[in-house]
Image (spheres, helix red, strand yellow):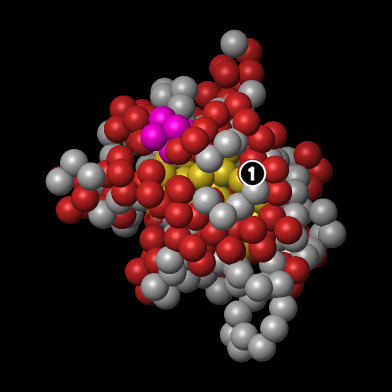
Amino acid sequence: MRPVIVAGNWKMHTTPADAGELARTIGARTRVDGVTVRDALAGPDVAAPDGTGLAVGAQDVHHEAAGAFTGAISAPMLDGLATWVIVGHSERRRDACETDELIGRKLVAARAAGLRAILCVGEQLADRDAGRAHDIVDGQVRGCLAASDPAALGGDDGRGFTIAYEPVWAIGTGRNARGADAAEMAGAIRAALASLAFSGGGDDVPVLYGGSVASSNIDEFMAEPAIDGALVGGASLKPDEMAAIVARAGLTAAARAAA
Ligand code: 13P
């Protein structure tokens, strides 16, 4: 069974003090005791400290393990600091001109260092309006993964990597995709994984939805069996919102576990 995952992407927000306070508040409101960003960062095993299921992730990683790359952070440098990492976010594609090929190399570097990676894909509004959303996302998945060995990515047990479908037009706009459309795109993503020889046809790889997720719309996504959680931007900076999203997703996790 695929895990239910809710990830908050704080982007370039918060100071260390703010982040600690925010993590503490979200932790308290989700009834996860004793977890703060600072505590998690200090621990050698941050995958799920105290069995809380809470972990810290980085927002990007360099595609090389080491080298003369001033200002960059490699996957091995995150050892002891983070157990997850996002690669291929549309803001990185836009601002740093990251290509699918480069993102694929980041994914391999992250996995080689034992990080759980969230690979982001998603179409622009013009692509959706032109009926090209499926083809764009299919191309991104293939472009990022074609050169990789599925076994090396460790996707098959649902713990190696996760894909987040984040339509660019939904990010930070307050205009979320419909649950049914997100589920359809999750199907397209898994079809691409299947054709890339992921065993199980990609069925073991969690697919999240991201783009203006809020407590008022999370149920629409969690109601879709193809969707395994959310990558939350703006709402993850609001403790009440994030706690409500986690709580709603938790109900789905419990229901799926009982089914
Ligand atoms: P918003 O939830 O603010 O739309 O951002 C989504 C996102 O980019 C998460 O990675």
Amino acid marked by disc 1: Pro
Which quadrant would residue 214 be assigned to in this image?
top left
Residue denoted by label 1 = 150
| Residue at 53 percent of width and 40 percent of height | 196
Name the quarter where the N terminus is drawn. top right
Name the quarter where the C terminus is drawn. top right
The answer to which of 44 and 251 lies nearer the viewer is 44
Asked if residue 157 is positioned above or below residue 137 in the image, the reply reads above
Asked if residue 70 is positioned above or below residue 54 in the image, the reply reads below
| Residue at 75 percent of width and 45 percent of height | 48
| Residue at 78 percent of width and 39 percent of height | 51
Q: Is residue 109 left or right of residue 168?
A: right
Instruction: Report x, y in % for residue 138.
Output: 38, 44
Q: Is residue 151 left or right of residue 253?
A: right
The answer to which of 250 and 121 lies nearer the viewer is 121
Q: Which residue is at the far top? A: 259
Asked if residue 97 is positioned above or below residue 163 in the image, the reply reads below
Q: Which portion, as a residue range, is magenta?
A: 187-191
Asked if residue 143 is positioned above or below residue 6 in the image, the reply reads below
Instruction: Report x, y in % for residue 238.
Output: 45, 53
Residue 68 is at least partly visible in this image? yes
